Amino acid sequence: MAKTRREQAEWRREKLLDAALDVFADKGVDGASVKDLAQAAGVTPGLLYHYFDSKDALVHALLAERGFLPQLRELLALDTGGRAAAEVLTELLGAFDQLLADNARLVALFFSAGQARTALGELAAEGQLLIGDFLAARVAAGELRPHDTRTAATALFATVAIGRTTGSPVDVAGLVELLYPIEFDLRKK
Amino acid sequence: MAKTRREQAEWRREKLLDAALDVFADKGVDGASVKDLAQAAGVTPGLLYHYFDSKDALVHALLAERGFLPQLRELLALDTGGRAAAEVLTELLGAFDQLLADNARLVALFFSAGQARTALGELAAEGQLLIGDFLAARVAAGELRPHDTRTAATALFATVAIGRTTGSPVDVAGLVELLYPIEFDLRKK
Amino acid sequence: MAKTRREQAEWRREKLLDAALDVFADKGVDGASVKDLAQAAGVTPGLLYHYFDSKDALVHALLAERGFLPQLRELLALDTGGRAAAEVLTELLGAFDQLLADNARLVALFFSAGQARTALGELAAEGQLLIGDFLAARVAAGELRPHDTRTAATALFATVAIGRTTGSPVDVAGLVELLYPIEFDLRKK
Amino acid sequence: MAKTRREQAEWRREKLLDAALDVFADKGVDGASVKDLAQAAGVTPGLLYHYFDSKDALVHALLAERGFLPQLRELLALDTGGRAAAEVLTELLGAFDQLLADNARLVALFFSAGQARTALGELAAEGQLLIGDFLAARVAAGELRPHDTRTAATALFATVAIGRTTGSPVDVAGLVELLYPIEFDLRKK
DNA sequence: GATGAATGAGTGTTCATTCAT
DNA sequence: TATGAATGAACACTCATTCAT
């Protein structure tokens, strides 16, 4: 079970990130001291600086390496060819909702750190854009009735996000049915 | 223009609150030092403690005295008797949107302060509940088609809130039309 | 019941001293803020400076005007001509003990304030000297057996003082009997 | 002369305690700022908090690690079997007196810190009790004349303590002779 | 006399960061 | 790699004192 130096170092780094995520979610980024972070990882404060240049760098690493934004982008970029819009939307929003649920602590961090908040904002914009494009394509294809697809995208995205972050998650299928009652009904049959 | 001592004191207090709102919105609650706050108000740090028991108490005072929650409650509690649902909804969400726009700095504070965040969460829950009740009543009255009013309320509330806080406000009328296309069309005629 | 200005001022001053004695005894001189003192006297901090030049001056005034040192000096200076040494001693120490009991808060102040502690030390020296002189005179007169009157004075003074300040007062008559068993017995007959 | 890191740390801690004892004795606990303490130890204020949780904790450490109370307890608990009461008393009080002399700065601290004062009070009670027991045993054994041993214990203890703390130490042998002239004389022969 | 707004220097304490070991 | 001693600058907060009203 001997670990190579490199493995050991990688393991330490991961442990520091894990611990930091916990502590940040609990106390907020400003509220957590480097000492807190080191203690939670079972390490001395000095060592933290071997792995990260600064506390700030740790936050960035957390966002970059533990962030679910890449996954979300992947999700939104999926080829949906041939499948019903209602089905795709339900699946997509469900996956988004699940992603938020799985990364609750990271989302908490997003709210406490200024820089992270910015990142979240960008993601939201991107997500709404992609969903909007998807909807517009389906309208163009005649599958969905003509409507303000941009607003619809915002509504879908926002509702799932707010539902999850306020602790009372929304029923995704119900949400899609709400906006697209006819399309949804077809699918049920 | 002579001010009495009392007036001068009241003015100082207001100035401190104003300055604090600016600084908090800019740097966040944790990021703003008492020195920052005092400087922004053109005052020594010590004086801040003549008017407020602590930095925390200042945040509370800001929420209590500058908060728009009472206005929002008032808004939601309005009697809507006799008017069309689509009209009421559009007006209500528009007012909510405007409230968020007018209190942008305070909303920023809501995101940076733990305690404020809690207050915001409670408000969101309350708002969604009230809108949901309104919708349910209109469904019962036969004005709106039967649908999941709770989810609809969340969608309406969330969409406006996210739209405003991410800096790309939503078209409220469009949003209502999106959820209630038939009812909205009737109104346009 | 109208008070003249002068009476009113005098009354305020006394009230300030009284309140200060209470607060100092409770929190110590360093631990009591001017605000505390003013509040306890039902007055604003600013007014305190009309009556006393500084917080320090208040402490000095307390020592000078409420101090029991003059009374103690008076006590020790009493003419004891003709009365039995044991009787005089018992009475004297009893009065000293009573003085300490009556001025418990002031004694507490003596322990908390550096300057006051010095004053107490001087008093102790003075008291022991006077008692020593008294004892020496009685030895010279043949009433008391030859002994180290200085040490005896210290013992008498110290025992009463410690007994009172530690909260377990000593039996003064018993103390005199302890040091002067023969003389005391004579007196009892 | 190379010191290991650990030794250096231990040395620093001791130096901080030493310096604190000096400064506290000089200015009192309240009168000494953390900055004063750090400067006296040739250190930055922050470092003090590496070794002690708070200023208060430093006072406690001083009492616990530099306190002479354990030594005093040891002294009083000594087996005195077979030796003359006057001899034991003289030795005991002499040792007590010496202890106070050796720990003058700590005794000064006892007078300035509320918590320390309490500890001192308890010690005094304990000391008087033990001396009282010793005297009572000797009375029972017929070595000392029947007398109020409790008062005698207080007198002995108080006289040495006051003598030393007021800066005019008492002659311990003279004190014992004063209370027990006959027993003392026997011993001299 | 009396107020309390205002100050400036100070308090104890925290903390991100560095670096000799 | 890993430690933890050490720093310096900041922090929230207190307080004796002054003075215009």
Image (tube, coloured by chain):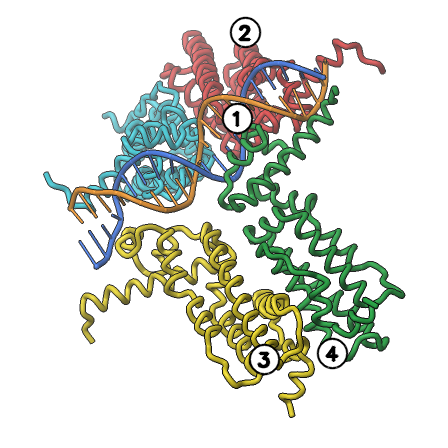
Chain colours: A red, B cyan, C yellow, D green, E blue, F orange
Q: Position of residue D170 (x, y in %)?
A: 65, 60
Quadrant position of residue B156: top left
Q: Nearer the viewer, residue A89 or D3?
A: D3
Please state if C145 lies on the left or on the right of B22 as rendered.
right
Q: Residues within 10 Å of mark 2 (few under 14, many from 20)?
A: few
Residue kind at label 1, given as amino acid type: Val
What chain letter is assigned to the residue under label 1?
A: A
Q: Name the residue rendered at 50%, 81% in the picture.
A: C80
Question: Dots 4 and 1: beta carbons under 8 Å?
Answer: no
Q: Which residue is mark 1?
A: A29
Q: Position of residue A145 (x, y in %)?
A: 40, 16
Residue at mark 3 to residue at mark 2: CA–CA distance? 127 Å
Discs 4 and 1 lie in a common subunit: no
Residue at mark 1 to residue at mark 2: CA–CA distance? 42 Å
Q: Which residue is mark 2?
A: A81
Please state if B1 lies on the left or on the right of B118 as rendered.
left
Q: Nearer the viewer, mark 4 or mark 1?
A: 4
Above/below status of A87 relative to B72: above
Q: Name the residue rendered at 23%, 69% in the picture.
A: C7
Q: Which residue is mark 3?
A: C141
State which quarter of the image contains the C terminus of chain D.
bottom right
Above/below status of A53 relative to D137: above
Q: Which residue is mark 4?
A: D147
Question: Dots 2 and 4: beta carbons under 8 Å?
Answer: no
Discs 2 and 4 lie in a common subunit: no
Discs 3 and 2 lie in a common subunit: no
